[in-house]
Image (cartoon, grey):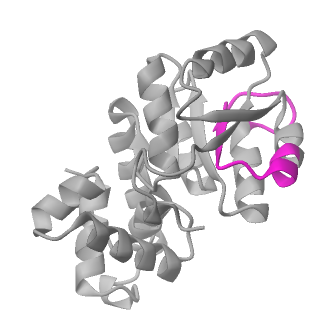
Amino acid sequence: MDRTQHDTGIGRRPTVVIVDDHPLFRAGVRQRLLGAVERVEVVGEAGSGEEAVELVESVRPDVVLMDIAMPGMNGIEATRAIKERCPEVAVLILTAYDDSQYVAAILEAGAAGYLLKTVEVEGLVGSIVGVFNGESVLDPAVSRAALSRLRRRGDSAGSADSAQSGLSARELQILRLAARGDSNKQIAAELAVSIRTVHAHMGHILAKLEVGSRTEAVVRGLQKGWLDLGDLS
């Protein structure tokens, strides 16, 4: 299902799987989310990357809260495996690591968002709902450096011209605004169109780029050279 077709706060609540190798931390996150039971629903927990991949294939949640540092299969590898097997599932990273190298790697693996474990409860719940509705969720303290790193990798790999992207001029314009961090509402205001129109364009962008989230679309655009560092400002 294309998550860009949902309106935030409208319709069913997103289902969530929590992945972390510390049982007490998982219990704490679950307890925090219980207070938002009308907005999200926890449907499972996993203590390792391997367990997470099996669980996600079984229950097909809307969102996975994923740690990076775990023994065996780490969060980056688990995210890549989940996106290969269940591309419709959004992976939201919740970690203590804020190094741009980690962020770049997890975004390349297909994560829809990245949060630090210092996030407040309301911010966590809002982010879960946000990625479920196709919004980009990146901690501003770490996202710009990571996205800049991805863009530089695209340069060194010999990027394609934006005309080869297969996107229309309007779709490229919306992708650039998304790269800047604008929400659907902000993009609609910027372009003087309805939010529904932005939803439709974003759905076309995701389909053409064969990705499952806005963040993945921005990463693809950076890697291919369709976006430049100025688009992140």
Q: Residue at x 28, y 52 (%)?
A: 183
**Of residues 214 and 125, the one drawn nearer to the viewer in this rendering:** 125
Residue 159: tell me if it is visible: no
Q: Would residue 147 appear left or right of 188 to someone viewing this image?
A: right
**Of residues 45 and 219, the one drawn nearer to the viewer in this rendering:** 45
Q: How many marks?
A: 0
Q: Residue at x 65, y 14 (%)?
A: 31
Magenta segment range?
A: 55-74
Vertical side of 227 occupied by 90: above or below: above
Residue 10: tell me if it is visible: yes
Task: Find out whether residue 126 is within the magenta segment.
Answer: no
Q: Would residue 121 appear left or right of 84 to someone viewing this image?
A: left
Q: Position of residue 172 (x, y in %)?
A: 28, 76
Q: Would residue 93 appear left or right of 142 to someone viewing this image?
A: right
Q: Residue at x 70, y 59 (%)?
A: 83
Q: Position of residue 129 (x, y in %)?
A: 48, 42
Q: Would residue 219 appear left or right of 50 to someone viewing this image?
A: left
Task: Find out whether residue 73 is within the magenta segment.
Answer: yes
Q: Position of residue 108 (x, y in %)?
A: 57, 55
Write down the quadrant of residue 204 in the picture.
bottom left
**Of residues 151 and 177, the one drawn nearer to the viewer in this rendering:** 177
